[in-house]
Image: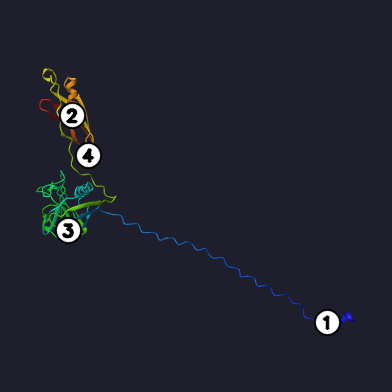
């Protein structure tokens, strides 16, 4: 009876409940990987299209843009002279109301680089304020190193045939301040790879600057020998010389004396477009007159 009563009491109790589940930590969502920011592509630098000359003067700096399409010969010549340092230290020898002029090594208006260049007919450039032109003599093909910069328009110059080859892009106020005697202290130029200037400069053969006569034997009057010899000289770009007699006098002692004397000669090397080069010369030397002549 007691067992039945205990069973009934147990059946009347509410069922036991399971403990609430423990709180689970929140699951972190994987972060999206941020792509590194790509740098913005840089715009390529604009390439220089024309040669730019910078002329430093005693009054300030003038920048010139040269025009190879208008005058390739004049531009090449101007570049060549600048690169040789030709203009450094020269003065502006002529200053007038409409222009300034420089580039003469004599400083008088009568000098030049030792050669002339051809006239070029311009297509677009006119003699306007800031334009650069080649100064010249009466002949159109007589320009060399002298140039002018216009301080005001000069349309009358267009009728006279001057080669124009550039314009001032900076420093025109400096040009207007220049007076006779102001110097070009330094000139430099940058040349774009698209333009290949031709070489310019004086051209001449090697020449002896100092001559020494041979010391001939005391008894030369009693000897039989040829009075002329043929000489071959190889003059290097630095002025050193190698002397050979290709036809002697017939007297070895006299020949040796001639060669010994000529080895003391001082030579100016040959120039080709302003650059020293090696050159081989052959000439006839006359012992009686100490003169040289080309030929046999």
Q: Nearer the viewer, mark 3 or mark 2?
A: 2
- State the residue position of label 3: 175
Q: Nearer the viewer, mark 2 or mark 1?
A: 2
Asked if disc 2 and disc 4 are in contact, CB closer than 8 Å, the reply is no
Q: Earlier in the sequence, mark 3 or mark 4?
A: 3
Q: Position of residue 81 (x, y in %)?
A: 20, 47
Asked if disc 2 and disc 1 are in contact, CB closer than 8 Å, the reply is no
The disc label shown at residue 276, or none: 4
**Which quarter of the picture shows residue 205?**
top left
Q: Nearer the viewer, residue 174 or 32?
A: 174
* CA separation in Å, label 3 and label 2: 52 Å
The disc label shown at residue 262, or none: 2
- State the residue position of label 1: 9
Asked if disc 3 and disc 4 are in contact, CB closer than 8 Å, the reply is no
* CA separation in Å, label 1 and label 3: 123 Å
**Which residue occupies 24% across, 51% down?**
188
Element marked by disc 2: helix
Badge 1: how crowded within 10 Å, few (<14), some, or many (20+)? few
Element marked by disc 4: strand
Q: Earlier in the sequence, mark 2 or mark 1?
A: 1
Is residue 2 in view from this perspective? yes
Quarter the C terminus occupies = top left
Q: Position of residue 32 (x, y in %)?
A: 53, 65
Badge 2: how crowded within 10 Å, few (<14), some, or many (20+)? many
Q: Nearer the viewer, mark 2 or mark 4?
A: 2
Q: Position of residue 4 (x, y in %)?
A: 88, 80
* CA separation in Å, label 1 and label 4: 131 Å
Q: Earlier in the sequence, mark 2 or mark 4?
A: 2
The colour mode here is rainbow
Q: Earlier in the sequence, mark 3 or mark 2?
A: 3
Whether 71 is drawn above or below 255: the answer is below
Element marked by disc 1: helix
């Amino acid at each position: 009876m007691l067992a039945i009563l205990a069973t009934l009491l147990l059946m009347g109790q509410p069922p036991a409940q399971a403990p609430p589940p423990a709180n689970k930590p929140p699951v972190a969502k994987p972060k999206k990987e941020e792509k590194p920011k790509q740098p913005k592509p840089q715009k390529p630098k604009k390439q220089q299209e024309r040669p730019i000359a910078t002329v430093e003067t005693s009054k300030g700096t003038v920048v010139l843009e040269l025009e190879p399409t208008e005058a390739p010969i004049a531009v090449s010549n101007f570049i060549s002279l600048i690169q040789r340092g030709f203009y450094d230290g020269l003065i502006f020898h002529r200053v007038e109301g409409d222009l300034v002029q420089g580039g003469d090594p004599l400083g008088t208006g009568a000098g030049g680089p030792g050669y002339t260049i051809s006239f070029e007919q311009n297509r677009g450039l006119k003699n306007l304020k800031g334009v650069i032109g080649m100064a010249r003599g009466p002949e159109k093909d007589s320009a060399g190193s002298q140039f002018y910069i216009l301080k005001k328009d000069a349309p009358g110059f267009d009728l006279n045939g001057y080669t124009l080859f550039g314009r001032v892009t900076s420093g025109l106020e400096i040009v207007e301040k220049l007076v006779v005697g102001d110097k070009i202290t330094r000139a430099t130029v940058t040349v774009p790879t698209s333009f290949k200037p031709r070489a310019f400069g004086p051209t001449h053969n090697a020449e002896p600057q100092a001559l020494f006569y041979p010391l001939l034997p005391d008894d030369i009057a009693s000897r039989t020998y040829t009075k002329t010899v043929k000489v071959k000289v190889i003059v290097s770009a630095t002025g050193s010389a190698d002397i050979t007699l290709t036809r002697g006098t017939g007297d070895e002692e006299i020949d040796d004396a001639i060669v010994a004397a000529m080895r003391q000669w001082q030579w100016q090397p040959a120039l080709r477009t302003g650059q020293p080069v090696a050159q081989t010369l052959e000439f006839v030397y006359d012992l009686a007159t100490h003169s040289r002549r080309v030929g046999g």
